[in-house]
Amino acid sequence: RKEVEQDPGPFNVPEGATVAFNCTYSNSASQSFFWYRQDCRKEPKLLMSVYSSGNEDGRFTAQLNRASQYISLLIRDSKLSDSATYLCVALNTGNQFYFGTGTSLTVIP
Amino acid sequence: NAGVMQNPRHLVRRRGQEARLRCSPVKGHSHVYWYRQLPEEGLKFMVYLQKENIIDESGMPKERFSAEFPKEGPSILRIQQVVRGDSAAYFCASPGSLLGTEAFFGQGTRLTVV
């Protein structure tokens, strides 16, 4: 079983829509969680960390559910510039980062 | 990229040649992670190194691939006798914060084997 699993999509949504991505992780001892964004085969860039209490950064909201071992990312009021691949990441107790394969988002005008 | 330096950005090698990819982590950090991204695929972990120590190489192919991170200088990912299937983007990452939680990536090396 993969450490981190994501629906690859693609998600095609109109501008202004709200879209949610989910991700599950298999290692209950994983310590920290993140969402990264990757554009056009460039390097992944940290979008936000994910905390148990949930956290929000502008149009982006991340949630962690430890009991169910899943992480979510909600994007409100989608912009064209949000089109990218979103990677879910878990950091385990061995300081090893495990990446999901990514979920592709295309925001359509 | 928060200071993670990779070079070269692009590398072309003929089948059978050797490829050497270099990575310097965020200043003050001594851990690096190497990932490979094949065309149309996700990031795959290869190896996790500390200076002069391999911590986890469970993602490294058994043959032709090796990695090191010497006391001085950058981390090196070495691919011997490259084949077409080695063509990929190779990314290096380093912890970037004092807590060492978030990972920051270099811009990657695009290896093309012709």
Image (tube, coloured by chain):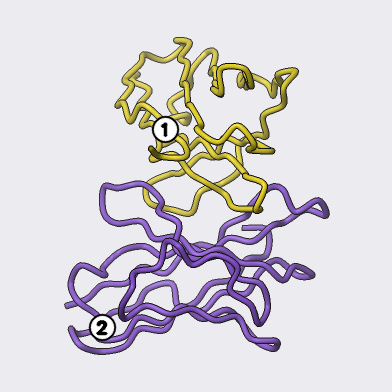
Given residues A42 and B43, the one toward you in this image is B43
x, y percent for residue B29: 75, 67
Label 1: how many Cα within 10 Å (few below 14, some 14–19, many 20+): many
Instruction: Specify the farthest residue to the right.
Output: B98
Chain to which the residue tagged by mark 2 belongs: B
What's under tag 2, amino acid-wise? Answer: Arg
Chain to which the residue tagged by mark 1 belongs: A
Q: Which chain can be seen in yellow?
A: A
Which of the 4 image quadrants contains residue A85? top left
Query: Is the N terminus of chain A in the top left, top right, bottom left or bottom right quadrant?
Result: top left
Q: Report how far apart the C-alphas of labels 2 and 1 lie in the structure.
A: 34 Å
- Label placed on residue A88: none
- Count how many numbered circles sit on residues in the image: 2
- Residue for point 34% across, 78% down: B11
Q: Secondary structure at mark 2?
A: strand
- Residue for point 42% across, 84% down: B20
Which of the 4 image quadrants contains residue B61? bottom left
- Residue for point 19% across, 76% down: B83
- Label placed on residue A5: 1
x, y percent for residue B12: 28, 79
Q: Which chain can be seen in purple?
A: B
- Label placed on residue B13: 2
What's under tag 1, amino acid-wise? Answer: Glu
